Image: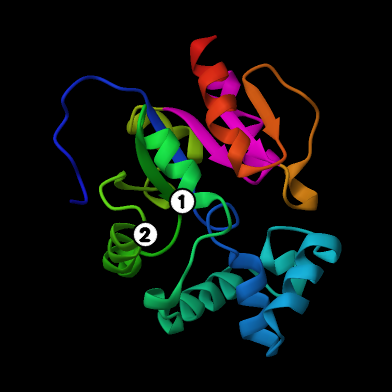
Amino acid sequence: MWVRDMVAHRCRVGLDFDGLLFEFYALILAWRYNLKFEDALYIVRHHWPSPLLEKSWGGTGEQAGALVTQFYRELNFSKIELVDGAEDMIQTLGAKYDLYLVTSNAHFTDDQFRALFNRLVPGLIRGIVRTNMWGTKIEAMLANDLACLVEDRFDYAEPLPLAGLKATVVDRYPWSYGPRRNGIRHVATLASVPWAVDKLLAA
């Protein structure tokens, strides 16, 4: 099932999709420039200047948004696999918390996302929280009662503690790193995420 019946109140944890669970940046780079995935992944991990596509490629934010929409319309969701360690992380977190996918992708991807996660981790993702409906990730988290967000971008995580929210940042990309903050834990791998979330929510 996509959404399970609630048997008891459990903390809600949000999981970013692009960049955290899915190699979005490498795949869209390979798609746009007809690169091998391995070459695109190396560029993203070592030379990609920003998670904002318009800063990496040029053009406007609207043009970058149109490219992302085209990318997802052409993407074959039936062949997507999550990054290494993502399924184990979701299973471990899902045993203790209610998990929600956090994304700004267009609504036309809803059915594909449901099918993808039901195929890979059935019953563990309770729903989708779309940040573009609320304005910011803080507003989206507060509106949907999410206590903690697992992210790959420090700039998204940094303001969350000011609103009483927690974040775990996986240090995967150049933009993942940032100064230590109360309410934010950095981890090197997805395997460490459940430990970090437990520590944050127990504090």
The picture places residue 61, in percent across and down from the top left corner, at: 62, 66
Check the image and name the residue furthest to the right.
47
Is 83 displayed left or right of 4 in the figure?
right
Task: Say which amino acid is labelled 1.
Answer: Glu
Residue closer to the observer: 64 or 111: 111
Earlier in the chain: of badge 2 and badge 1, it is 1
Q: Position of residue 47 (x, y in %)?
A: 86, 65
The reply, left or right, for residue 29 in relation to residue 139 is right
What residue do we see at 20% from left, 20% from top? 8
- Give the number of callouts: 2
Say which element carries label 2.
helix
Q: How packed is label 2: few (under 14 Cα within 10 Å), some, or many (20 or more)?
A: some
Q: Which residues are magenta?
A: 147-170
Q: Are marks 2 and 1 in contact (CB under 8 Å)?
A: yes
Q: Is residue 169 magenta?
A: yes
Say what amino acid the circle numbered 2 marks.
Answer: Leu
Q: Position of residue 54 (x, y in %)?
A: 70, 68
Residue in the picture at 65% in, 25% down? 184
The residue under the point 18% across, 40% down is 4
Residue 113 picture quarter: bottom left
Q: In this rendering, does residue 161 appear at all?
A: yes
- How is the protein colored in the picture? rainbow
6 vs 108: above or below: above
Q: Quadrant of the C terminus?
A: top right
Q: CA distance from mark 2 to mark 1?
A: 7 Å
Residue identifier under label 2: 120
Q: Is residue 149 magenta?
A: yes
Report the front residue among 55 and 203.
Answer: 203
**Above or below 183: residue 155:** below
Q: Residue at x 62, y 19 (%)?
A: 183
